Amino acid sequence: MDALSVAVDAVTPYLIFLAMGWLIVRSRLARESFLQELNQFIFVALYPITMFYNTHAISASFAESSLLIGVCFALLATVIAVSAVVVPKLEGDDARRGVIIQCLNRSNIVLYAIGMAETLFGAEGAALASVVVAIFVPVYNVAAIVVLEYYRGGSNSVPAFARKIVTNPLFLGAMVGLAFSLLGIRLPQAVESTVSKLSALTTPLAMIVLGGTIHASGVMRDMRTISWVLVAKMLLIPAVAVAACVAASLPQLETFVCFIMFGTPISANAYTMSQNMGGDGELAGELVAISTVVSLVTLFVWIFALRSLGLV
């Protein structure tokens, strides 16, 4: 299938970045402590630039996709709300609770959405997927900030919690980008190009760091948690999303874009944010890495099923 080929193309660079990180540490080109420091740099310096870049040029003309966007927002809110109720019953550690809730609701739509939608539906698919990416990447990150800050602990007062949110580097990057968008401010071409290149560095570096810091012993220890989280993330939640699209009578293209939003692997951002915001970064890294590999199978199954049912 062409769409599966796009999925393989999307996964392969991730696997190479993971392997590079593993080899860098094993060959002693860098210590794991250096990668941990690099991870903090990515969080404080590069992710805010990425957030700014993803929001600074958002168009306000989403009227034609309003039903799809509404369905996606409702589904995302439902996943977060249900996770917030269910996960604490299954996991007793706050550092792991925040990570699991974050990983259940965020997917790697940046790498998958536009390419897969364009393969199946042409330029129209790419255009619609671009709209969804532009809207929901910032939403994913703001939601993750709220969840991880809540489970980080410390003061439970509303002012203290709000202060942590608004001083988070990713939130600040998103807000500055949104201000640029609302005010119609456009960057000079040279600056735009530089910001774009810095933003493009973020995910590869995050995956290299992840490859160098993930441990097989940790994967084996966490396998029970990893298993049920990935069943929910890669099978149950996408099934609910597709069912919601059918109930809302969304056309094939919009159904597929919604599926991509909920059925693709966990974003590498989940690892970096968890590691730097008091979450269990090791568990987050394991979920990111394994979901990326598992997606080669789950995406094939999902695309085949959706095609067979005439939904895409």
Image (cartoon, rainbow, N blue to C red):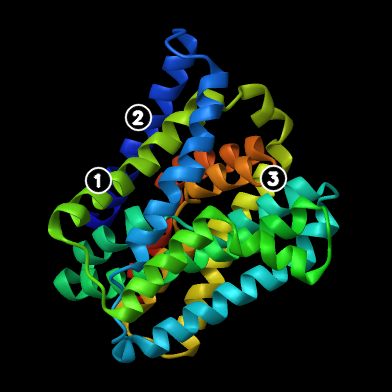
Q: How crowded is mark 1: few (under 14 residues within 10 Å), some or many (20 or more)?
A: few
Mark 1 and mark 2 residues within 8 Å of each other at the beta carbon: no
Depth check: give the residue in front, 301 or 232: 232
Q: Is residue 98 above or below residue 274?
A: below
**Badge 3 local density, few (<14 within 10 Å), some, or many (20+)?**
many
169 to the left or right of 80? left
The residue indicated by pointer 3 is 279
- Mark 2 — residue? 16
Residue 75, percent from left and from top: 56, 77
Q: Is mark 2 on a helix, strand or loop?
A: helix
Residue 168 x %, y %: 58, 56
Q: Is residue 276 left or right of residue 14?
A: right
Q: Which amino acid does label 3 sit on?
A: Gly
Quadrant location of residue 2? bottom left
Q: Image point 69% across, 68% down: which residue?
A: 162
Compared with 30, 246 (above or below) is below
Marks 1, 2: nearer the viewer: 1
Q: Name above or below for residue 18 compared with residue 169.
A: above
Mark 1 → mark 2, Cα distance in angstroms: 20 Å
- Label 1 amino acid? Lys
Q: Which quadrant of the rendered structure holds the C terminus?
A: bottom left
Label 3 sits on a secondary structure element that is loop
